Amino acid sequence: MSWIENRFEEGLIVTSLDWAINWGRSNAIWPMTFGLACCAIEMMAVGASRFDIDRFGAGAFRATPRQSDLMIVAGTVTYKMASRVKRLYHQMPEPKYVIAMGACTIGGGPYFKHGYHVVKGVDLVVPVDVYVPGCPPRPEALLEGLMRLQDKIRGQSIAKDRWRDVKEEAFASA
């Protein structure tokens, strides 16, 4: 028998502040309404009733970056669009997360070899937290990526995250 048993009233929950904050963050992710190409159709399907992203607390797609904490980059990122993607990312409040969805987003896709206008991976523009491969990836794959992001959020600490700051500085100077 441990010393803490029978010391508290029934119905009292003892937990860490990290766990409580991360539980709230991971179950209330608000993605930005943002699609660049054909992968955006699959992203829209995730929000429909068949796949129902609301089950994961991420169904409130926001129209402005100032109200969202998840950017799902779905589609081909061109050099012309890269500066806008970066601007939208910087307008999002902290903590912010990025999911790269699709082969074109992750590595340039079929345009990599012959296209001079395509960014060879969105991770050259903004820091990416989760990669969802495929051309286009199925809606189930995006839901799996969302669950991996939730796992990542649950493992964070409210203490200063030094790696995130280093990563942000590297992208701010680029």
Image (cartoon, rainbow, N blue to C red):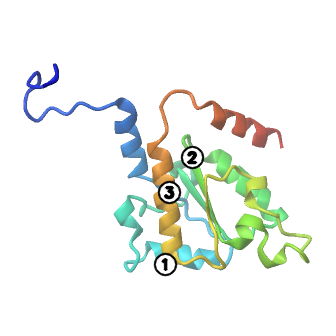
Q: Which of marks 1 and 2 is nearer the N terminus?
A: 1
Q: Looking at the image, do the residues carrying marks 1 and 2 touch, with CB atoms under 8 Å apart?
A: no
Q: How far apart are marks 3 and 2 (CA)?
A: 15 Å
Q: How crowded is mark 3: few (under 14 residues within 10 Å), some or many (20 or more)?
A: some
Q: Name the residue under label 2.
A: 96
Q: Which of marks 3 and 2 is nearer the N terminus?
A: 2
Horizontal side of 107 relative to 16 (left or right) equals: right
What distance separates the C-alpha of mark 1 from that of mark 2? 23 Å
Viewer-side label of 3, 2: 3
Q: How far apart are marks 1 and 3 (CA)?
A: 19 Å
- Circle 3: residue type: Arg
Asked whether 60 or 159 is in front, the reply is 159
Residue beneath disc 3: 148
Would you say 9 lies left or right of 16 here?
Answer: left
- For badge 2, the amino acid type reads Lys
Is 95 on the left-hand or right-hand side of 167?
A: left
Looking at the image, residue 15 sits to the left or right of residue 66; the answer is: left
Residue 8 location (% of width, % of height): 11, 24
Write down the residue under mark 1. 45
Give the residue drawn at x 71%, y 67%: 105
Q: In this view, does 152 lie above or below 9?
A: below
Observer-nearest of 2 and 18: 2
What residue is drawn where x is 37% and y is 78%? 49
Which quarter of the figure has residue 12? top left
> For the residue labelled by badge 2, is the local secondary structure a helix, a strand or a loop?
loop
Q: Is mark 1 on a helix, strand or loop?
A: helix
Q: Which of 64 and 161 is in front in this view?
A: 161
Residue type highlighted by circle 1: Ala
What kind of element bears circle 3?
A: helix
Find out whether the residues at labels 1 and 3 contact each other: C-beta distance under 8 Å: no
